[in-house]
Image: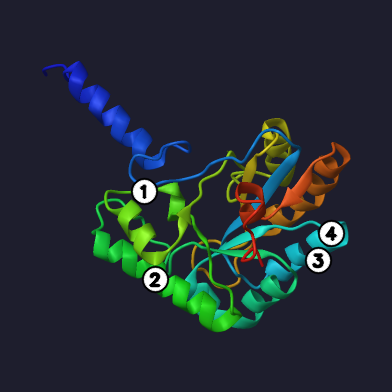
Amino acid sequence: MQPVPPAILASAGFLAWAVRGRSAAVLAPSAWRGPRDRSRIALTFDDGPSESTPLLLEILARHRVAATFFQCGANVERLPAVAREVRSAGHEIGNHSHTHPYLCFRSPRFMEAEICRAQEAIERHTGAVPAWFRAPFGVRWFGLGRAQRRAGVGGVMWTAIGYDWKAKADAVAARLVSRVENGAILCLHDGRELRARPDIGVTVEAVRRLVPVLLERGYTFETVSRLLCPTNSSNAS
């Protein structure tokens, strides 16, 4: 078996980083952190809304902190009242595609349709017009940048992700606490792709532990719009 030429290995490594790297902006402009000059952070949730999203809203309301929920259009259509509750509570709604597909090897037309369908569903049921898009699984592909521009949304990744779909609550909270810093964008999940009644007990408990610790450390929670664009955040809720 012939060894793989270094040039091919290097190209494969670069493509993998471009597709999944949190700081990559090769395939689509994508913010992964905010300014580091102040102790401000953004707490974000993907894959919702779900039947358990209100449990998270209760915790956030108790501590008076804002978050950004990247919602799937299909879940919004399934649970419009929950989606509206997120906005009514003062949180920002972002776009997480309509059906939560992997975007790799998909056409620009497919990606644009996914973003636009979710955009339309979110606006129709909540009145919010998302300013930000987070790709499902954090996977971006060729043509996504154009699709984002045509849909009028910016891209957002994360500074730290909690792995709340597979780790225990204490490990999730500890992981995020250890990685938080000024300008950090933290990623958790209030749903599990398009599943009905998903078990997000780990996420709920992790947030219950995480938020008070970060508040005690002097961090202020902002929506993504307020973190990234503090002078132009009128669509943040």
Q: Earlier in the sequence, mark 1 or mark 2?
A: 2
Alpha carbon of mark 4 to alpha carbon of mark 1: how far?
A: 33 Å
| Quadrant location of the C terminus in the rendered image | bottom right
Q: Earlier in the sequence, mark 4 or mark 1?
A: 4
| Residue placed furthest toward the front | 231
Q: Which type of secondary structure does the marked residue at label 4 adopt?
A: loop
Binning the other alpha carbons within 10 Å of mark 2 as few (below 14), some (14 to 19) or many (20 upward) gives: many
Viewer-side label of 1, 3: 1
The numbered dot on residue 43 is none
Q: Residue at x 70, y 44 (%)?
A: 41
- For residue 98, what is the image quadrant? bottom left
Give the residue type that dot 2 points to: Cys
Q: Earlier in the sequence, mark 2 or mark 4?
A: 4
Q: Is residue 234 left or right of residue 59?
A: left
Q: Earlier in the sequence, mark 1 or mark 3?
A: 3
Give the residue type that dot 4 points to: Arg
What residue is disc 3 on? 58
Alpha carbon of mark 1 to alpha carbon of mark 2: how far?
A: 16 Å
What residue is disc 2 on? 116
Binning the other alpha carbons within 10 Å of mark 3 as few (below 14), some (14 to 19) or many (20 upward) gives: some
In the rendered image, residue 150, in percent from the top left (x then y), is placed at 35, 64
Q: Which type of secondary structure does the marked residue at label 1 adopt?
A: loop
The numbered dot on residue 140 is 1
What residue is disc 4 on? 64
